[in-house]
């Protein structure tokens, strides 16, 4: 059990009368690429919103590496190692591509230069600033955005904006990366590149939780999935078996 | 005569700029118009009055008034604005107007309606280019300029400043990046209020009579300056403030139009907004869907 990264236990949330998530459990092991699937409105994004601190759960708990992070603030959860991307992209639109990534790096504690250092361009500032730029470039190279690093982020085409969101999330050095429909709006070529990027991230030892609508995408990437339907778990387990489960097929085709 | 008027305009423009900076930072980062900002100047001036009466030391009084003002700004944000985050901008605006009246009434209850005299002392004057210029005017100019340069450097190069830019750009994304947005917004109010206290100090040197509506007109002028310069833009607040101060000074000099000075200023505001709705230095915002 020691290799469990994310452990969600009996999580529920309601908005007014609507029970968006009920008795939700999920366990993800280190290094796993885990899928969360389900029809529109099933509650997938809501799960992300809870485990990144955007929403507070009505009841239940979730743990990262054994630490209870339920009801903790967004920035605390971020520092503890959960990062995410959004279904509808939220970049720093007025900043360059590389600045977007630098914001993620800046909020990391290890870079601790003071204002004094930075004004006087003291060695420590210079060194850390260079380290951060190098790190940012490395991350941008991983998502194939190195050549557009000085463009304003809102001028990028949609697919590249999605990749930038991933690079920015990685800048916070997460243990768990949550991707909310990363392939949405991408063409087949971009989708294929994205799959390669996701594998590369996994190979760095980062655990990934992926929300996706496209079943082909999920079965190509994830070893295990959980299917959500109207806030309830419909099925959960090995991807192949789950996706052939008659009930799951019915929810998808009939629903 | 021209030179003297210009220096005069630069000095009141500097004060406007300092107040406008508070407006613009709060607008840029917390995304709201703090209409109680002018009243923070007024309260800080009363603190100045009390401290000078007690200690007789203008500099100590100034420091205490700055600290008081910062705390007041943070408390106002916590009490009146933070609970309304995420609700309609109109609700926040009404809360700000309510806060403005609350501060004015509290001060009136404590100090009464009779004007107080804040005697900071005569700093003398020096002669430059054959013109006598009061030292306080030069002091205002130099201080304003220094504060603005420091603030710009702070925002551009410090970690906190960069976090401010991130919060201003996209609050949700900033939170996601591990930035403590509550702390950044509180700090923004603290900085804006400190500048308001400094502006209050210079206003008191210029005309020492103090009532509970001291902040009203400068508040509106500074707001106008911030909008002319491009609300949310720090250099914009400087340019707008200085411009407004200079226009005002020259307008006062011309007997024909002097009575209409305020009207002329607002007319300029309207013209600038018609030509460039985002203000002189403001960026055009492209709303994304
Ligand atoms: N902040 C909210 N307030 C009210 N209802 C919400 C809120 N967030 C999500 N919901 C509701 O919860 C349900 C699940 O939404 P969501 O998690 O976005 O679904 P999915 O991501 O699976 O498509 C939907 O019915 C949605 O309307
Ligand atoms: Mg969703």
Image (spheres, rainbow, N blue to C red):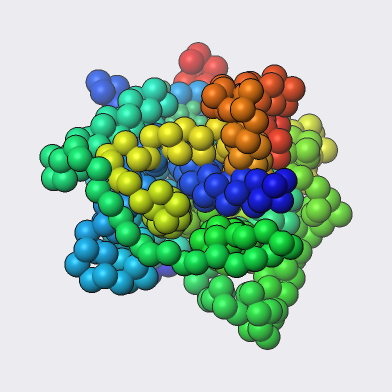
Task: Provide residue A208's location: percent of width, then percent of height.
Answer: 55, 53
Name the residue rendered at 69%, 26% in the picture: B272
Q: Where A41 sits versus B46, above or below?
A: above
Does residue A100 show up?
yes
Left or right: A239, with A197 as reference point = left
Residue A174 seen from this side: no
Q: Using the image, determine if residue A239 lies above or below residue A112.
A: above
Q: Could you say where residue B217 lies in the image, as x and y percent from the top left?
A: 43, 34
Q: Nearer the viewer, residue A107 or B51?
A: B51
Decide which of A243, A111 is in the foreground and name it.
A111
Residue that appears at 32% across and 59% down? B119
Q: Relative to B94, is B195 on the left or the right?
A: right
B46 lies left or right of A232: left
| x 30%, y 55%: residue | B118
Q: Quadrant of residue B91?
A: top left
User: Which one is nearer the viewer's eye here, A102 or B282?
Assistant: B282
Q: Quadrant of the C terminus of chain B?
A: top right
Extreme residue in the left direction = B109
Most foreground residue, B243 or B128: B128
**Residue B6: x, y in percent?**
68, 47
Ligand 1 lies in which image quarter?
A: top left
């Amino acid at each position: 059990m020691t290799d469990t990264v994310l452990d969600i236990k009996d999580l529920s949330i309601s908005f007014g009368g609507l029970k968006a998530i009920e008795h939700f459990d999920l366990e993800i092991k280190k290094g796993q690429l885990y899928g969360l699937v389900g029809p529109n409105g099933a509650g997938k994004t809501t799960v992300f919103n809870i485990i990144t601190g955007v929403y507070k759960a009505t009841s239940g708990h979730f743990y990262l590496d054994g630490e209870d992070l339920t009801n903790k603030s967004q920035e605390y959860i971020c520092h503890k190692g959960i990062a995410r991307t959004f279904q509808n992209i939220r970049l720093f639109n007025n900043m360059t591509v590389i600045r977007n990534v630098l914001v993620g790096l800046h909020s990391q504690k290890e870079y601790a230069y003071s204002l004094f250092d930075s004004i006087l361009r003291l060695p420590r500032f210079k060194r850390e600033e260079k380290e951060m730029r190098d790190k940012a470039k490395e991350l941008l190279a991983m998502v194939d955005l190195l050549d557009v690093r000085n463009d304003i982020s809102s001028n990028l085409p949609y697919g590249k904006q999605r990749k930038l969101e991933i690079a920015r999330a990685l800048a916070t050095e997460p243990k768990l990366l949550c991707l909310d429909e990363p392939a949405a709006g991408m063409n087949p070529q971009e989708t294929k590149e994205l799959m390669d990027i996701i594998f590369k991230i996994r190979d760095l030892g980062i655990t990934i939780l992926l929300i996706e609508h496209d079943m082909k995408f999920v079965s190509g990437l994830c070893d295990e999935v959980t299917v959500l339907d109207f806030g309830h778990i419909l099925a959960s387990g090995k991807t192949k078996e789950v996706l052939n489960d008659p009930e799951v097929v019915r929810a998808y085709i009939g629903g | 005569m021209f030179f003297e008027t210009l220096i005069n305009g630069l000095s009141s423009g500097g004060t406007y700029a300092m107040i406008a900076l508070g407006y613009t930072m709060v607008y840029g980062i917390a995304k709201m118009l703090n209409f109680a900002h002018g009243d923070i100047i007024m309260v800080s001036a009363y603190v100045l009055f009390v401290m000078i009466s007690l200690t007789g030391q203008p500099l100590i009084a100034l420091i205490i008034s700055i600290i008081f003002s910062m705390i007041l700004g943070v408390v106002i944000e916590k009490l009146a604005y933070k609970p309304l985050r995420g609700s309609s901008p109109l609700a926040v605006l009404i809360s700000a107007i309510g806060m403005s009246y609350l501060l004015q009434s509290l001060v009136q209850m404590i100090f009464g309606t009779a004007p107080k005299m804040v005697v900071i002392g005569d700093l003398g004057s020096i002669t430059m280019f054959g013109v006598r210029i009061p030292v306080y005017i030069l002091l205002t100019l130099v201080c304003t300029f220094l504060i603005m340069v420091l603030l710009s450097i702070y925002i551009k190069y410090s970690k906190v400043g960069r976090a401010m830019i991130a919060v201003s750009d996209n609050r949700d994304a900033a939170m996601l990046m591990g930035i403590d947005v509550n702390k950044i917004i509180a700090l923004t109010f603290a900085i804006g209020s400190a500048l308001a206290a400094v502006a209050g100090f210079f206003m008191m040197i210029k005309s020492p009579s103090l009532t509970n509506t001291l902040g009203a007109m400068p508040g509106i002028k500074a707001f106008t300056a911030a909008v002319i310069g491009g609300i949310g833009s720090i250099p914009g607040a400087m340019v707008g403030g200085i411009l407004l101060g200079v226009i005002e000074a020259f307008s006062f000099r011309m007997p024909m139009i002097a009575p209409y000075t305020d009207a002329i200023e607002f007319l300029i505001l309207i013209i600038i907004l018609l030509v460039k709705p985002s203000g002189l230095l403001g960026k055009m915002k492209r709303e994304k869907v």
